[in-house]
Amino acid sequence: MRTRLIRPLDLAGTALFALQGGATAAAAGLDVFGVLVIAFVTAVGGGIVRDVLLGATPPAVFSDLAYPVAAFGGGLVVVLVYRLVRAVPPEVLLPLDAAALALFAVVGAAKAVDHGMSPLLAALLGAVSGTGGGVIRDVMLGRVPLILRSDVYAVAALAGAAVVAVGLRYGRRRALVLAAGFVVCFLVRMLAVWQGWNLPRVAG
C-alpha cells in the first residue's frame, strides 16, 4: 500500500519539476543538452538528497528506470514545445511548480516517517526533498536559490511536510494525510506569490 501510493506521487513530482526546470533553462538561453541536464537535476536532485539521507541507496533514480524517463521526458517536452511554453504567462505555469513542490514535500516527509524519523526531522527532510532540486538548478544557472530570496518557498514545503509528518506519526489515514499536506503546501505557495508574501529581510 505504501509503495503503491508513494511511487506515483514521486514520479508525478519528478515530471512536473522536469518541465519547470527545463522551461527555466530554455528561458536562460541554454542549448538542447543544457535544457535536458537542468531538467534532470531539477527533477531528481531533491529525491537523491532525500534517499541518501535516509540510507535508501542506491537512490530511486538509479534503481528505477521510470524516474530518469520522467525526468528526461519532461525536459524533452520543453525542447519540443518551448515556443508554446514560452508564450504561456507565468501565472499559468506557477501552479505546476507549486504542485511539484507539494508532491516532493509530502513524499519526502512520508518516506522519512516510514524510516522511523521523528516528526520534526521528517518535516525538515520533506522540505529538503521539495526544495533540493531547485537549489541545484539555481546554482547551476548562476542565480541565488529561490528559497533564499522570495515567495516563502521553503516555508510552504515545510508546512506541507509538517502536516504529513505529524499526521502519520499519530496514525491518521495515510491518503488523507498526504492529501492534506499537499493542499497546505500548494495553497501557502500560491497565496505567497499572489499576495506578495515574503519573509522579513535582514537589510535593505
Image (cartoon, grey):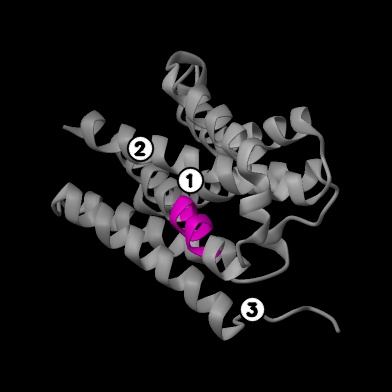
The numbered disc on residue 125 is 1
Q: Which of marks 3 and 2 is in front?
A: 3
Q: Which is nearer the eye, 11 or 133?
A: 11
Q: Where is residue 109 in the image (x, y as percent from the top left)?
A: 38, 46
| Cβ atoms under marks 1 and 2 closer than 8 Å | yes
Q: 21 left or right of 183?
A: right
| 96 within the magenta span | yes
Which residue: 53% across, 27% down? Answer: 52
Q: In this view, does 64 lie above or below 89?
A: above
Q: Give the mark nearer the N terminus: 3 vs 1.
A: 1
Q: Which is nearer the eye, 116 or 164?
A: 164
Q: Is residue 160 above or below residue 110?
A: below
Graded by Cα atoms within 10 Å as few (under 14), some (14 to 19) or many (20 or more), the crowding at tag 1 reads many
State the separation of the CA atoms marked 3 and 1. 22 Å
Q: Which is nearer the eye, 152 or 172?
A: 152
Location of the C terminus (image quadrant): bottom right
Residue that label 3 marks: 198
Location of the N terminus (image quadrant): top left
Please report the bounds of the magenta region as a residue range: 94-101
Do we see residue 6 in this rendering?
Answer: yes
Q: In this view, does 141 lie above or below 158?
A: above
Quadrant assignment, res 77: top right
Residue that label 2 marks: 111
